[in-house]
Image (cartoon, coloured by chain):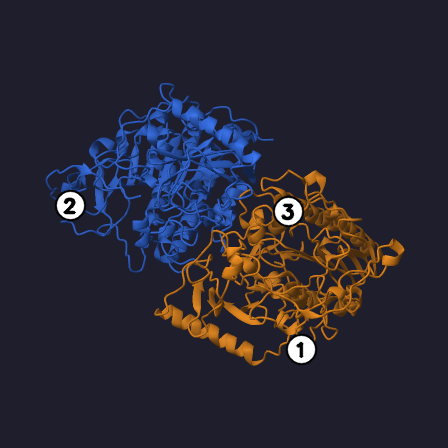
Chain colours: A orange, B blue
Amino acid sequence: KMGLWKGSLTSSGVFLLQMGWGDLGAFGEPSKETPNLDQMAAEGMLFLDFYTASPLCSPSRAALLTGRLPVRNGFYTTNGHARNAYTPQEIVGGIPDSELLLPELLKKAGYTNKIIGKWHLGHRPQFHPLRHGFDEWFGSPNCHFGPYNSTERPNIPVYRDWEMVGRYYEDFKIDLKTGEANLTQLYLQEALDFISKQQASQQPFFLYWAIDATHAPVYASKQFLGTSQRGLYGDAVREIDDSVGKILKHLQQLGISENTFVFFTSDNGAALISAPKQGGSNGPFLCGKQTTFEGGMREPAIAWWPGHIPAGGVSRQLGSVMDLFSTSLSLAGLQPPSDRQIDGIDLLPVILQGKLIDRPIFYYRGNELMAVRAGLYKAHYWTWSNSWEEHSKGIDFCPGQSVAGVTTHTQEEHTYLPLLFHLGRDPGEKYPLSFASEEYQRAVEHLSGLVQQHRATLVPGQPQLNVCDQAVMNWAPPGCEKLGKCLKAPESDPKKCSWPH
Amino acid sequence: KMGLWKGSLTSSGVFLLQMGWGDLGAFGEPSKETPNLDQMAAEGMLFLDFYTASPLCSPSRAALLTGRLPVRNGFYTTNGHARNAYTPQEIVGGIPDSELLLPELLKKAGYTNKIIGKWHLGHRPQFHPLRHGFDEWFGSPNCHFGPYNSTERPNIPVYRDWEMVGRYYEDFKIDLKTGEANLTQLYLQEALDFISKQQASQQPFFLYWAIDATHAPVYASKQFLGTSQRGLYGDAVREIDDSVGKILKHLQQLGISENTFVFFTSDNGAALISAPKQGGSNGPFLCGKQTTFEGGMREPAIAWWPGHIPAGGVSRQLGSVMDLFSTSLSLAGLQPPSDRQIDGIDLLPVILQGKLIDRPIFYYRGNELMAVRAGLYKAHYWTWSNSWEEHSKGIDFCPGQSVAGVTTHTQEEHTYLPLLFHLGRDPGEKYPLSFASEEYQRAVEHLSGLVQQHRATLVPGQPQLNVCDQAVMNWAPPGCEKLGKCLKAPESDPKKCSWPH
């Protein structure tokens, strides 16, 4: 009964957070504390097989905004084999000028683009989001780690558009003892104001709401502290859930919900290393953030667009954050760039007409293709959780989930006899199929064909996450003079970044 | 807006199966293949913290029908410490005459009582369900294990009321190679017919639909084979889901849904030992059937009663299968017996008025109190998965879920310093709280008080599951002459049953 959307200007909103597949009531979280997200799912479409592009934050975000795998857009490292990397304050690299970002393209269709929250695609001037298609920004370039002693390491700046307006832990308080911070409320208000402004001026918009409260160190506003069965992490989830509800309600009250496509998802699986106090749940899946098991890369995902998406839909389409690039372009009546490989696909036929598009999912860790999924089969060509050395220090990406020969603590190659799982019968990747079975032969042949095809055309981008330098940290971001917050940078001393896992 | 129910005759239906907490879409199963159960939940009330009374089938069923813990009603063994026991064909014991079963009591209020499916409370003549309050029976006394060579062991009989009408694998086919059997369809038709008959005669009824398709060896009807992403187990779940939908729709079409209270739950957690081909999922919980971790005893649970239960309700009441005893009596306007301890509570104030009743959950394994939960805290006084000897043979109740010091392979006593978990922050029981913390002290003091109180008044029943004898097997059940299916029993040779875990 819902027809294919036919191309008048429609706004888009993307909520991107760090949450696990199992953190939402709609996905089976045992205390069911996300009534607004569950309602969003009931009114929209739930994706059960939706993936991020990397088990770590920065590469996933770069992939979302470029529609391309991190290995293409440069958000990876070659400092070690199969290492995850991101953009800490020391990072020299960032999003290359040669990449075309979603907001850059949407501009051509008259969109106003805003990012609220964590950018994470590089913090040096040339990587500023307003130089890559965004019109407005309120948020920070890096994670809210801290507090730091300003002589060794500056606190993370908070920007409004081109200039810093303060720093986390200084002007934007985060109390690590109580877990109290009102940042999600600030980010919520910013979103509501932006939407009101766009509605008033009748301008289509792209809002990228990339808030950070569920990332360690976890925080929540006072009114949410102690309200969850799940502790501080749950308090943060409840505040985000409440905020999402308020944003969707705002769209409805302004009468633009039928012109606004909204998508909720996550940049990586729950950080089990921080669980249960500072990390979430990946439900029935194996391991978490940093790994290419399902817990590291399968994400909660909800599409919402009243009047277009049939309510209560459930899709088994294999989806990816990179599809939000192609889908948003399609909504704006634009074509994806034809001069480069785009990994995302347009999900509108899936969302509006219930189609299923045959496509594989590639699981990368740094520059290594660790695994591939097609249909219900997933083959691992490499397995690794983290090193024995780290593990012996208590760093565990798979707490209580050791599976012999699968969650290995050395990098194990399986190229010639991939480890094969049937994710329908065995979503937890606990029971590898027998190498001798006919089912194994058939599935692996198909998957390996897809991998061969993928590899044959792959042109890796210049790796951006190899070099670190204390001098490039956020010592003196633009606007620091007005605030008297300029710090003195040390001498430049570029080094290879150290990526232990 | 829904008022307290005021006591006119209302029928009850209880669906009892072996399924895991994570097997339903509404509880987060990743392929979401239970639209009818999910719909039942959306129209009724979902219980997130509902427990069975034992991690094994027979004791749970005895507890449901008596409202009493197995250690009281005799459904336990003292042959070994903390051993699970049930009613195989060799069992000599069964439900004692001194126990008052729910259907016996409902009779006084004019109810007609029917059991469809697995009885499991003893198969010798004195334990027959029609001697314990049921008016009708179509089903079997034991699990559908088999097929057996009739000289060593008879196949399980299927009864209609007082007499056997055939045997599994003989007259009631189960094809273990293809997994095909039409039994669920037979049991469905039987339920629909019974409900029609009761509606026509305007008689209140209690229907106990205790079917068996998701218990190994798993089966499904031809029309469901190969229809699930989850393999044969999923096919069986889909058939049950479809059947539940048909029964609820039948109630609605007959116009008696507002006079029929329906409850769906399970007798133990998913049998991970049979997963993924013959067993289900316990979602985010630890281990499965046979254990007193959450995966062994927390169950999916849905209450449905259109016009009385507010749609879409979610309750965090700590509930138990034993509560179905007290709740059903309350619905019939009856009082529970006052001459004995009843462990179940009346859930109507919870279901109809959203109240929360403070009550502990006791986790027994055989005669040992292994753990207790109150609020969000759970203390383990004993931990055990199974023995090293069994484990080394590949019998694993916690596949891929080893938690050091928790999923122990020897019986570990923690009486003096219980292992404490916060099930809100840590539903998977992976992170024991520090003994030194104030939180630990406070919670353990409270829980240990509850245990002391419980123990002080506990009068264990005569254990029914100690003695086994080949002579008591289903050699010649009543009705066998007519069918020419009487087999010759061997000489009686009673022995202690062997309960390895």
Residue farthest toward the right in the current orientation of the protein: A482
| Residue at 39% across, 22% down | B456
From the image, which quarter does the N terminus of chain B lie in?
Answer: top right
Q: Is residue A197 above or below residue B200?
A: below
In the drawing, does residue B174 fall left or right of residue B224?
left
* Distance from the alpha carbon under mark 1 to that under mark 2: 75 Å
Residue farthest toward the bottom in the current orientation of the protein: A456
Callout 1 environment at 10 Å: few (<14), some (14 to 19), or many (20+)? Answer: few
From the image, which quarter does the C terminus of chain B lie in?
Answer: top left
* Distance from the alpha carbon under mark 3 to that under mark 1: 38 Å
Q: Is residue B447 above or below residue B280?
A: above
Q: Nearer the viewer, mark 3 or mark 2?
A: 3
Q: Which residue is mark 2?
A: B485
Q: Chain of mark 1?
A: A
Residue farthest toward the top in the current orientation of the protein: B339
Mark seen at residue B91: none
Q: Chain of mark 2?
A: B
Q: Position of residue B214 (x, y in %)?
A: 36, 49
Q: Quadrant of residue A478?
A: bottom right
Q: Position of residue B383 (x, y in %)?
A: 40, 41
* Distance from the alpha carbon under mark 3 to that under mark 2: 62 Å
Q: Position of residue B162 (x, y in %)?
A: 23, 35
Mark 2 falls on what kind of element? Answer: loop
Q: Which residue is mark 3?
A: A237
Residue A393 can be seen in this image: yes
Please tell me which of labels 3 and 1 falls first in the chain.
Answer: 3
Mark 3 falls on what kind of element? Answer: helix
Q: Which residue is mark 1?
A: A340
Which residue type carries mark 2?
Lys
Which residue type carries mark 1?
Arg
